[in-house]
Image: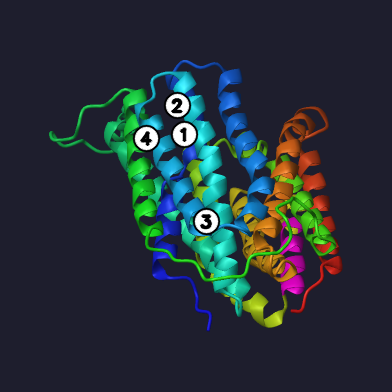
């Protein structure tokens, strides 16, 4: 009889996401501390995307034919190596190597985790993926708290801001250079990755029968609608990734603190709701949950550019969070259902399509914002999500 994921798996997920935390926010600061120009900093993001996307489609079929646990452990070893390199790096060349390792390790860990989770949760796929989504937010929250603590203790600019309101005690440490502070933060992230690696060594996969077909990348017809949904929703995410925070800051001018407060509210939803949303999807149907979840962000994206209140902005982001908390577990459950034997291939294609959609749309989002008008990327993103919800109608499902 199949059982749910072991506790060590959830612990691995928590500490693995704690190793990431606010990494994408810190990376540009790290590049600046190493005196890299904007083009080089952009390259640091591209190296990760290229290495991660390039591996997803190819790794999926391999996961259906070999043991998954060694790939999971190998990916976490790369995580530890990448974050340790970040903690020691003093040249841009070393950072590029670390980003390459991080991209490969990230794909190996989280693609393998999705396949294992699908096999442990045959009776409640969406519930399992909803819990996974919550635990990833909890882990990232721990890393964000660690970054905030280190910054409050050792960052000169933050120290100056604190002294405007309170008098610091005599034992308060002297400020560090920005590079030294970032090295400390990355060292803490590397420690979290090491704990995740130790937890992964306690995870054992279920026995299974490998597919009889030869190893090859192929696209089963039953997966085509799901791949289309992933690509369309990825385009919506890519369009808004570069411009959402820019518009928020331009509209209200609240700076980093204001941005953090606005996004903290939907963050609570991401940390609490996906588990219950997954249980609802298991009871009422995956297609219905996915379509409803994809439609809710449409409301957010169509109204957001004209929202004149920061409270209204936070409320609309909560609507988006509710929708994605419902849609994401349901979509991953649909992939597990559509590919009961070759789940590695299924999840590889599904995540590859979403990543390609986002990568292609990121540059377009910024260009549309600057040249076609601020609302345009939001309107197109809303249309994409509505189209994705419509495409769910063509997804084959037994629930």
Is residue 145 visible in the rendered image? The answer is no
Which residue appears farthest toward the left when viewing the image? Answer: 170
x and y percent of residue 329 in the render?
63, 66
Which mark is drawn over residue 267?
3
Q: CA distance from mark 4 to mark 2?
A: 14 Å
Going from N to C along the chain, the mark reached first, 3 or 4, is 4
Q: Could you tell whether 352 is left or right of 26 in the image?
A: right
Give the mark count.
4
Task: Look at mark 2 in the image and give the residue it sits on.
Answer: 30
Look at 38% across and 20% down and name the residue there.
Answer: 90
Q: CA distance from mark 3 to mark 4?
A: 28 Å
Q: CA distance from mark 4 to mark 1?
A: 15 Å
Q: CA distance from mark 1 to mark 2?
A: 6 Å
Principal secondary structure, stretch drawn in magenta: helix
Relative to the observer, which residue lies in front, 275 or 194?
194
Mark nearer the viewer, 3 or 4: 4
Look at 82% across and 71% down and name the residue there.
Answer: 396
């Amino acid at each position: 009889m199949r059982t749910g994921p072991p506790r060590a798996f959830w612990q691995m997920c928590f500490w693995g996401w704690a190793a990431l935390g606010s990494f994408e926010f810190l990376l540009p600061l790290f590049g600046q501390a190493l005196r890299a120009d904007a083009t080089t900093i952009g390259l640091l993001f591209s190296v990760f995307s290229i290495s991660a996307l390039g591996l997803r489609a190819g790794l999926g079929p391999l996961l259906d034919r070999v043991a998954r646990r060694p790939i999971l452990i190998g990916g976490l070893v790369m995580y530890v190596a990448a974050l340790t390199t970040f903690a020691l790096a003093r040249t841009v060349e070393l950072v590029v190597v670390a980003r390459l390792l991080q991209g490969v390790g990230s794909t190996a860990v989280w693609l393998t985790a999705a396949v294992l989770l699908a096999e442990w949760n045959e009776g409640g796929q969406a519930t399992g993926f909803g819990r996974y989504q919550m635990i990833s937010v909890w882990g990232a929250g721990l890393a964000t708290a660690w970054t905030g603590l280190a910054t409050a203790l050792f960052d000169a600019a933050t120290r100056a801001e604190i002294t405007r309101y309170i008098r610091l005690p005599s034992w308060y440490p002297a400020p560090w250079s920005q590079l030294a502070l970032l090295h400390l933060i990355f060292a803490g992230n590397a420690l979290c990755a090491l704990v995740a690696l130790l937890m992964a060594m306690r995870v054992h996969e279920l026995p299974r029968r490998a597919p009889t077909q030869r190893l090859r990348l192929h696209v089963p017809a039953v997966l085509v609608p799901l791949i289309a949904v992933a690509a369309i929703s990825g385009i919506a995410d890519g369009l808004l990734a570069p411009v959402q925070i820019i518009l928020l800051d331009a509209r209200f001018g609240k700076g980093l603190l204001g941005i953090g407060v606005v996004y903290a509210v939907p963050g609570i939803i991401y940390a609490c709701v996906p588990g219950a949303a997954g249980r609802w999807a298991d009871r009422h149907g995956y297609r219905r949950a996915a379509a409803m979840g994809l439609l809710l962000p449409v409301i957010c994206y169509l109204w957001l550019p004209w929202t004149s209140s920061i409270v209204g902005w936070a409320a609309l982001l909560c609507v988006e969070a509710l929708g994605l908390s419902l849609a994401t577990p349901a979509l991953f459950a649909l992939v597990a259902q559509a590919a009961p034997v070759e789940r590695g291939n299924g999840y590889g294609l599904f995540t590859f399509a979403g990543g390609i959609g986002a990568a292609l749309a990121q540059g377009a989002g910024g260009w549309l914002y600057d040249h076609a008008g601020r609302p345009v990327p939001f309107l197109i993103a809303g249309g994409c999500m509505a189209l994705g919800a419509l495409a769910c109608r063509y997804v084959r499902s037994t629930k």
